[in-house]
Image (spheres, grey):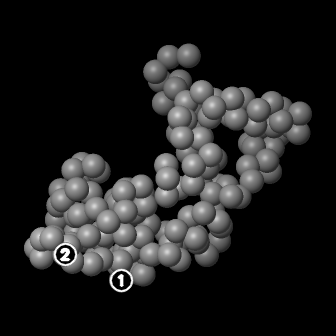
Amino acid sequence: MDGGELHRLGKRLIDLSRQVTGEPGDLTLTPGEAAVLEDVIKHPNGSVSEISTRTGFVQSHVSASVSRLKRRRLLATAGDPRDGRRTRVRATRDTLRAVDRRGERGIDGTVRDAVGDTTKAGRVTALLDELADLLLPDRGATAREA
């Protein structure tokens, strides 16, 4: 495998993961909103500037994304008690529950549909489990811990 194949495989796995975790009627986010939301879940009570640093987005983009996600009740903000100029951002309880529910959806049907054979799907799932064991040091952690 070379870098190009690894990239294509990564994109394919992302597509499969979206098929598993997405359902009709699910919330849709822009890629920037998704990145901000993911960062906030991984780093609760971070500031907008901290989120900006971690995501690589300019602060104005992060502020606008936080504002939109707050209006949609996905994020909540509070003033920093130590620095009144700073705003702390966290995911709402409902958002964390929804992320956990989506993450618990099984992959078997999606993998079977992708490879077209139950036996091959079992092998793919076993290989994915092995890769996860090798490449994800925090395997088994919830979205909030990852």
Residue 36 percent across, percent down from the top left: 35, 60
Image location (x, y in percent) of residue 9: 57, 32
Residue 55 place in picture, x, y as percent: 29, 50
Residue 49 vs residue 88, the one in the foreground: 88
Marking on residue 125: none
Comparing 67 with 113, the one in front is 67
Quarter location, residue 51: bottom left
The kind of secondary structure element at disc 1 is helix
Give the residue pinned by disc 2. Answer: 81
Quadrant of image for the N terminus: top right
- Horizontally, is 80 left or right of 55 in the view? left
Which residue corresponds to the image point at 80% horizontal and 51% vertical from the top-left? 109
Rendered image quadrant of residue 42: bottom left
Query: 111 or 38, which lies in front?
Result: 38
Closest to the camera, between mark 2 and mark 1, is 2
Q: Amino acid at mark 2?
A: Pro
In the current view of this chain or complex, which residue is farthest to the top?
A: 1
Q: Is residue 110 above or below residue 138?
A: below
The answer to whether 41 is drawn above or below residue 139 in the figure is below
Separation (CA) of disc 2 from disc 1: 23 Å
Residue occupying image coordinates x 21% and y 50%: 53
The residue depicted at 20 percent of the width and 73 percent of the height is: 80
Q: Which mark is residue 71?
A: 1
Please indicate whether residue 130 sits to the left or right of residue 123 in the image. left
Going by the numbered disc 1, the residue's amino acid type is Arg
Do we see residue 8 in this rendering?
A: no
Other-residue count near label 2 (Cα within 10 Å), few / some / many at <14 / 14–19 / ≥20 = few
Across and down, in percent, residue 83 comes to 12, 71
